[in-house]
Amino acid sequence: MEKDVTMMTQSTQPQAKLYMRHIEQIDNHNFQITWSDNTVVSYRLSDLQRKCPCAHCVDESTGKRRMLPSAVDENVTALKISNVGRYGLKIIFTSGCSTGIYSYQMLLPQKSIKPVPQEIFLER
Ligand SMILES: [Zn+2]
């Protein structure tokens, strides 16, 4: 007797962890991230600064944006872009913002990434 077991064996596959494979600067205002699933996305620094999550741009208690998008210089550049753990990107802008962390969810909103549990390394 045949039984359809596909329903029963269907496992909830854990979502593959997405991480940045490669960050490449295109020019002074644009850079490109190659994600671990080979998606390549280009970012313009001014676009990202408009979404900057730092305390200078967003009121920490109300969550309201203090920095108007129109106040962001279209030609803003960055001193440094670095990976933060396995969950975000930190950008040190020439115009002041430096503490905001761009999470993977912010960088890839179209992918509706489930939050990846932050890898915690315990020190002994
Ligand atoms: Zn900011």
Image (cartoon, rainbow, N blue to C red):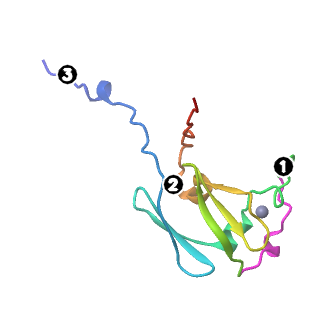
Could you say which quadrant of the image residue 109 lies in?
A: bottom right
Q: Which residue is mark 1?
A: 60
Of mark 2 and mark 1, the one earlier in the sequence is 1
Q: What residue did someone put label 2 on?
A: 111
**Residue 80: x and y, percent?**
64, 68
View quadrant of ligand 1: bottom right
User: Mark 2 belongs to which amino acid?
Assistant: Lys
Q: Nearer the viewer, residue 70 or 33?
A: 33
Residue appearing at x 44%, y 42% in the figure: 15
Which residue is painted at 66% across and 72% down in the image?
45
Residue 4 pos. (x, y %): 23, 25
Q: Residue furthest top?
A: 1
Q: Quadrant of residue 13?
A: top left
Residue depicted at 67% across the width and 72% down the height: 79
| Residue hosting label 3 | 3
- Magenta span of residues: 64-74
Lower position in the chain sequence, tag 2 or tag 3: 3
> Is 64 positioned to the left or the right of 29 in the image?
right
**Marks 2 and 1, how far apart at CA:** 26 Å
- Camera-side mark, 2 or 3: 2
**The C terminus appears in which quarter of the rendering?**
top right
Which quadrant is the N terminus positioned in?
Answer: top left
Q: Is residue 74 left or right of residue 6?
A: right
**Overall secondary structure of the magenta section:** loop
